[in-house]
Image: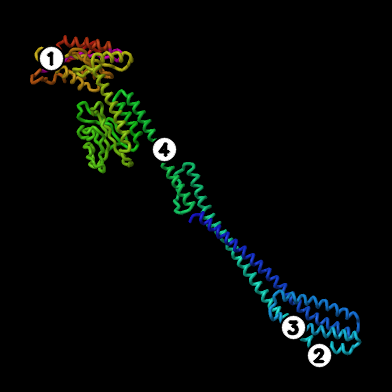
């Protein structure tokens, strides 16, 4: 029941009980009044009866004393008693008017008749005495008739007093009982009213209003401070407090939902900001390694619940290799053929998951592995792949950020394509298109760099010339000559590996810089280049071209800043090697005037 209904009922009952208790008090007061009237009537009637008895005796005594003594005072007293007698008659008349009972009225009639008879005898006796008939007067006052009448009068007065006493006492008892009963009823009603009031105070105001409000005050205070972790027990009461509790519960849920939406909005803004930062840095990357580092740095910040890898396709567009990873992905291979990924086949994102109802990619190392593959495309061509998988300790679905994943994939794809295009353009500007070695322009830039940096590191230089190269062009054609050039350049690159950089100096001449390499090591490396080239017979289009040999001139300096002079000294040593019969290595060292020669194999 609602508190307002309970309050209204309690108010109504309280008003009713108050009215009833007031009525009971009124009736009790009325009964008390009746009791007082009954007491007064009882006293008046009792006093009247006593006055009648005493009045009759006193009047008789005064009359007798007068006829005996002849004292005029007794006569005056006798006549005074007559006045009192008339007053008693008036009182008796009033008793009749007050509603005396029939028995009382009969007793009063007897008293009046006997009093009149007695008065007549006494008056006659007084008159006889006044006529000097003293004997006659005394006989009348002391005679048997007077005694009989006086005795009857007293008996009638006694009977009257008994009758009035019984009636008035009954009326008094009835009035007292009614007064007591109404007083008790009023007290009971007042006690019920007080109990109802206390019950309303305790059960309604304290238990159903005050205590819940005290509890909700703390809850509301915490909710006002946006502390939505506070527990709001749901009160099922169907009253105002229950409705207030339900409203607070709804407010808390709305606050939690608002916080969730605000958190998602802030997270979304943070994600967009990270994506924007990532795009700016991708645009500033100059190498694929830098791009991979940027992706590996920002991807886990944008998608903290996803691990992943960045794959780049090889130049043949046949396979992919991971160039970056984050948060330790473990379900996808490090490298795999392009045909192993359904995303690359379809040209659109592909989800591999047991509960997704789609076929899984072959590059996943588990049959039931889940992952998201987003192809990297540029101008319609696939150039790589972004792979994402859920972390083992998280359960967030990858589909939740599909739009951002595709946006990032698009920008990463464009960045990779731009870097690859830049690398191609750079290679065209610094590499020889026939051999793939750095060209003469690149050689000049490196010489200037060594000179400008004034490096104190040792530097060795080789000048390599193909022996009798014109013979290959004349006998087998220029295609065969180009094949010889490519063969020699490949042997040079494979032999020196990471020890230096090879250049096409011009025509059939090549140059090699070996920074940080000591003289003996550089000479040994030059000899391996020469012997490796000489050790394989070359063929072209089914025709044996024969063995190819080279002449090498070597120079060495303790300081790389002397690169220009070093190149000139190596070229001079090459000329000496060619003049000395070819297929040999001549090394010129600044600290030793001797020439180290190696004869032809």
N-term-proximal mark, 4 vs 2? 2
Residue displayed at 21% across by 21% down: 493
Q: Tell me the element at label 2.
A: helix
Judge by depth and name the residue closer to the eye, 576 or 418: 418
Q: Which residue is mark 3?
A: 110
Residue 385, horizontal then vertical, whole percent:
26, 31
Judge by depth and name the residue closer to the eye, 131 or 55: 131
Q: Is residue 559 visible?
A: no
Specify start and end residues of the magenta stretch as a single range: 546-563
Calculate the distance from the C-alpha at mark 4 to the C-alpha at mark 1: 72 Å
| Label annotation for residue 513 | none
Q: Is residue 99 visible?
A: yes
Q: Which residue is mark 1?
A: 478
Calculate the distance from the C-alpha at mark 4 to the C-alpha at mark 2: 127 Å
Q: Which residue is mark 4?
A: 262
Calculate the distance from the C-alpha at mark 1 to the C-alpha at mark 3: 182 Å
How many numbered marks appear?
Answer: 4
């Amino acid at each position: 029941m609602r508190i307002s209904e309970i309050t209204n009922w309690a108010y109504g009952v309280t008003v009713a009980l108050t009215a009833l208790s007031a009525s009971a008090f009124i009736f009790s007061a009325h009964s008390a009044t009746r009791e007082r009237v009954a007491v007064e009537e009882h006293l008046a009637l009792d006093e009247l009866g006593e006055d009648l008895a005493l009045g009759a005796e006193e009047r008789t005594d005064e009359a007798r004393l007068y006829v005996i003594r002849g004292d005029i005072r007794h006569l005056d007293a006798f006549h005074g008693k007559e006045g009192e007698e008339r007053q008693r008659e008036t009182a008796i008349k009033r008793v009749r008017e007050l509603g005396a009972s029939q028995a009382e009225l009969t007793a009063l009639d007897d008293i009046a008749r006997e009093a009149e008879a007695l008065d007549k005898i006494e008056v006659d006796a007084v008159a006889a005495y006044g006529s000097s008939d003293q004997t006659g007067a005394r006989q009348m006052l002391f005679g048997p008739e007077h005694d009989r009448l006086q005795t009857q009068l007293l008996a009638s007065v006694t009977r009257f007093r008994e009758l009035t006493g019984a009636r008035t006492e009954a009326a008094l008892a009835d009035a007292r009982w009614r007064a007591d009963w109404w007083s008790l009823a009023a007290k009971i009603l007042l006690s019920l009213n007080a109990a109802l009031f206390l019950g309303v105070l305790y059960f309604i105001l304290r238990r159903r209003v005050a205590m819940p409000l005290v509890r909700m005050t703390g809850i509301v205070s915490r909710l006002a401070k946006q502390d939505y972790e506070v527990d709001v027990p749901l009160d099922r009461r169907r009253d105002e407090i229950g409705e207030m509790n339900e409203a607070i519960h709804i407010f808390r849920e709305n606050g939690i939902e608002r916080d969730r939406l605000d958190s998602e909005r802030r997270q979304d803004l943070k994600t967009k900001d990270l994506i924007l930062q990532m795009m700016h840095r991708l645009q500033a990357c100059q190498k694929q390694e830098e791009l991979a580092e940027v992706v590996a740095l920002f991807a886990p910040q944008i998608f903290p619940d996803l691990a992943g890898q960045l794959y780049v396709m090889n130049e043949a567009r046949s396979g992919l290799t991971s160039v970056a990873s984050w948060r330790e992905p473990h379900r996808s291979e490090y490298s795999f053929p392009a045909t192993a990924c359904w995303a690359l086949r379809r040209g659109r994102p592909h989800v591999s998951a047991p509960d997704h109802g789609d076929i899984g990619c072959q590059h996943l190392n588990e049959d039931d592995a889940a992952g998201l593959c987003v192809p990297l495309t540029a101008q319609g061509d696939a150039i790589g792949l972004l792979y994402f998988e859920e972390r083992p300790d998280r359960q967030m679905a990858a589909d939740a950020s599909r739009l951002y994943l595709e946006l990032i994939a698009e920008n990463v794809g464009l960045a990779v394509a731009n870097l690859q295009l830049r690398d191609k353009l750079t290679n065209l500007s610094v590499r020889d298109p026939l051999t793939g070695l750095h060209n003469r322009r690149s050689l000049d830039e490196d010489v200037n760099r060594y000179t400008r940096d004034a490096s104190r590191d040792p530097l060795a230089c080789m000048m390599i010339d193909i022996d009798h190269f014109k013979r290959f062009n004349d006998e087998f054609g220029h295609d065969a000559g180009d094949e010889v050039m490519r063969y020699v350049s490949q042997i040079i690159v494979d032999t020196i590996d990471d020890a230096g950089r090879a250049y096409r100096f011009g025509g059939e001449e090549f140059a090699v810089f070996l920074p940080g390499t000591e003289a003996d090591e550089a000479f040994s490396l030059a000899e391996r280049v020469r012997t490796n080239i000489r050790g394989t017979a070359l063929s072209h289009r089914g025709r044996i071209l024969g063995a190819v040999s080279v002449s090498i001139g070597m120079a060495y300096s303790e300081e790389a800043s002397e690169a220009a002079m070093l190149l000139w000294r190596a070229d001079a040593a090459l000329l000496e090697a060619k003049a000395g019969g070819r297929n040999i290595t001549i090394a010129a060292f600044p600290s030793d005037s001797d020439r180290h020669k190696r004869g032809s194999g």
